Image (tube, rainbow, N blue to C red):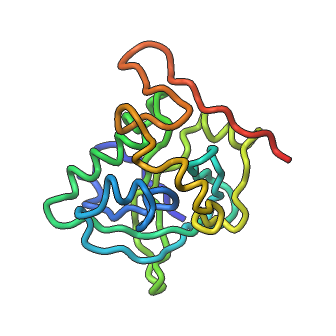
Amino acid sequence: MRAVADTAGAGATGELPFFVYGTLRPGEPNYELYMRGRTAREEPARLEGALLYDGPGYPYVIEAPGTVVGDLVTAKPGEYGELLTVLDGLEEYVAPGDPANVYDRVARDVLSAGGTTVSAWVYFAAPRVAQELRARGRLIAGGDWLAHAGPYARAAYSPARQAGPAHARPGRAAPAPSGPEPALPPLPHSP
């Protein structure tokens, strides 16, 4: 698996598709809110070398031996820049290596349903979040958010129930423009 940090936006690698694995998957609440009408194509895909954790209520991917199930989403022509900005805001990605990041956006090779390896943007848990998840997070068996999160869990995190800025998440206040790092949501203790 190849890892490429985003050091200059998408300019160095082109307009990559997005590998989405949770609430941004087609049919999920954040897809409807942030991606509908901005995509040209979606297809099932999988990410090797990663594990999926419940954050709780929304997922995080961390680097580890395993497989995560998701979708490869390609932006419509002319929508890429805006979609990238919207997703960076939603995922609380500020810049490469920024300590305020909740997720880090990195390029990874993803296997499409057709068997083709495609380089795509993937939002991984930032290092401080990944450390918390490894210590006391809840691993999602099988790496598939859709199989894990039933209708009750999806309703609890639907766009209609999210208040505040687009990047605010349930159980966590929106990050301040400056000052201390935003607080992480409490993670469940492992069973």
Instruction: Please state the horizontal and vertical placement of residue 121, each as a whole percent of the image.
Output: 40, 57
Q: Residue furthest right?
A: 191
Q: Residue furthest bottom?
A: 114
Of 40 and 1, nearer the camera is 40
- Residue 158, placed above or below residue 179: below
Q: Residue furthest left?
A: 78
- Picture quadrant of residue 16: bottom left
Residue drawn at x 40%, y 35% is: 163
Instruction: Please state the horizontal and vertical placement of residue 28, each as a whole percent of the image.
Output: 45, 61
Give the number of callouts.
Answer: 0
- Picture quadrant of residue 128: top right
Of 20 and 185, nearer the camera is 185
The reply, left or right, for residue 87 in relation to residue 157 is: left
Of 87 and 149, nearer the camera is 149
- Residue 124, placed above or below residue 18: above
Instruction: Please state the horizontal and vertical placement of residue 27, each as a whole percent of the image.
Output: 42, 67
The reply, left or right, for residue 144 in relation to residue 28 is: right
The reply, left or right, for residue 184 in relation to residue 169 is: right
Residue drawn at x 56%, y 24% is: 183
- Residue 163, placed above or below residue 173: below
The reply, left or right, for residue 15 in relation to residue 21 is: left
Which quadrant of the rendered structure holds the N terminus? bottom right
- Picture quadrant of residue 144: bottom right
Residue drawn at x 73%, y 63% is: 141
Instruction: Please state the horizontal and vertical placement of residue 7, each as a whole percent of the image.
Output: 34, 43
